[in-house]
Image: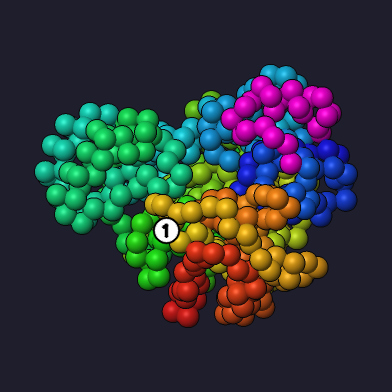
Amino acid sequence: MKILIVGSGGREHAIAWKVAQSPKVEKIYCAPGNAGIAEYAECVDIGAMEFDKLAAFAKTEQIDLTVVGMDDPLVGGIVDVFEAQGLRVFGPRKNAAILEGSKAFSKDLMKKYQIPTAAYENFDDPQKALEYLETASMPIVLKADGLALGKGVLICNTLEEAKEGVKSIMMDKKFGSAGNQMVIEEFMTGREVSVLSFVDGKTIKIMTSAQDHKRALDGDQGLNTGGMGTFSPSPFYTEEVDAFCKAQIYQKTVDAMAAEGRSFKGIIFFGLMLTEKGPRVLEYNARFGDPEAQVVLPRMKNDIVDLFEACVDGTLDQIELEFEDNAAVCVVLASKGYPVQYEKGYEIRGLERFKDQKDRFVFHAGSKFSDGKIVTNGGRVLGVTALGKDLKEARANAYRAAEWVEFDNKYCRSDIGKAIDEA
């Protein structure tokens, strides 16, 4: 098989690494890819939003399956474009990717089908949002409706902060058109857990749990980022939690989308909050999480290509999804100053130490080739993932491996997975 992967981050590197293990696959392409992905795939200079060019490439190269890693092209309708031209593609159509593309849509879906989530109101008029805040209790959560690189959520402790947040999202358009509409949501407390799943329109298969660290600085301080590290499994995702979610959340979401005429095929990412009143859905994503993919995929026993094809063909019920009885921790190595301002173009040293490692991996998020060297090319540069018999061993292995890599202005949190010690 020939496979094309669309995207350029750590998630797509993890997907390419996993796809390369399939005996079915003879050639992998990635558009646009990065310096790390180039080890497994031929990188193609086509942007992830250039749908017609990507489809033309898939036809010319006789690609058997295209795997879309990123949210923007999925929400933009890349799957519809490919399917209209008779091309096989893994991912939800535009009318299903709205599950991630519009927080207002997903909240209304949960309300309609009684899927547990936080109380909320949707607003498209900033003045009405400001009036609503006058009667709301603090703290409160503001969410830009559309895609905002994982950063369009503000937790406001005071009325003044909340008003400033409305101004920032809806009037100043800090997140662009993503802020044309906004969700104001009750503030929930509890552990956050990420659960990824494969879906074929009717059947859902749940992957192992993970837990992400969104804040830039130790102790969950600083600005929200795309993710500074993650671990899997989450010790807080118990059998009791799993049973509740299977009964009240997972299949109900798939059935709700089908009932709305928006049959979902691909990955549904469930962002959960484990509250005192039970698990609640914080958010849905319509693709693998980043960096969650970097800890979930190394633990997966299955050939991932079998799963992609089963989702496309509607035969997922015939596959048993299996994971190793181990643990994984990913530490993101970022450029100092991320997510605000940071410099690029610094040489990355020490990557050769990961060659032929069986339990330590480096996934590139922001890298490129320059004058024969691999240099930094983003805020999140690398994700260093390590396996271990349990989370403590995996965490120790990940931080040791993170020391193998050097580049100017390298920064990482020192407490990824520290919650493990409290479990």
Write the residue at 23% across / 53% down.
Answer: 156
Number of marks present in the image shown: 1
Percent position of residue 88, x then y: 75, 30
Residue 60 covered by magenta stretch:
yes
Whether residue 295 is situated above or below residue 248 in the rendered picture: below
Q: Is residue 43 above or below residue 384?
A: above
Residue at position x 67%, y 78% from top? 389
What residue do we see at 12% from left, 44% from top? 135
- Give percent across and percent down for residue 150: 44, 47
Is residue 407 positioned above or below 96 on the image?
below
The color scheme shown is rainbow
- Residue 111 screen position, x and y as percent: 36, 39
Looking at the rendering, the stretch of residues picked out in magenta corresponds to 43-64
Name the residue furthest front: 371
Percent of width and height locating residue 92: 60, 34
Tag 1 residue:
337
Query: Is 393 contained in the magenta span?
Result: no
Residue located 28% across and 53% down the image: 155
Amino acid at the residue labelled 1: Gly
Disc 1 is placed on an element classified as loop
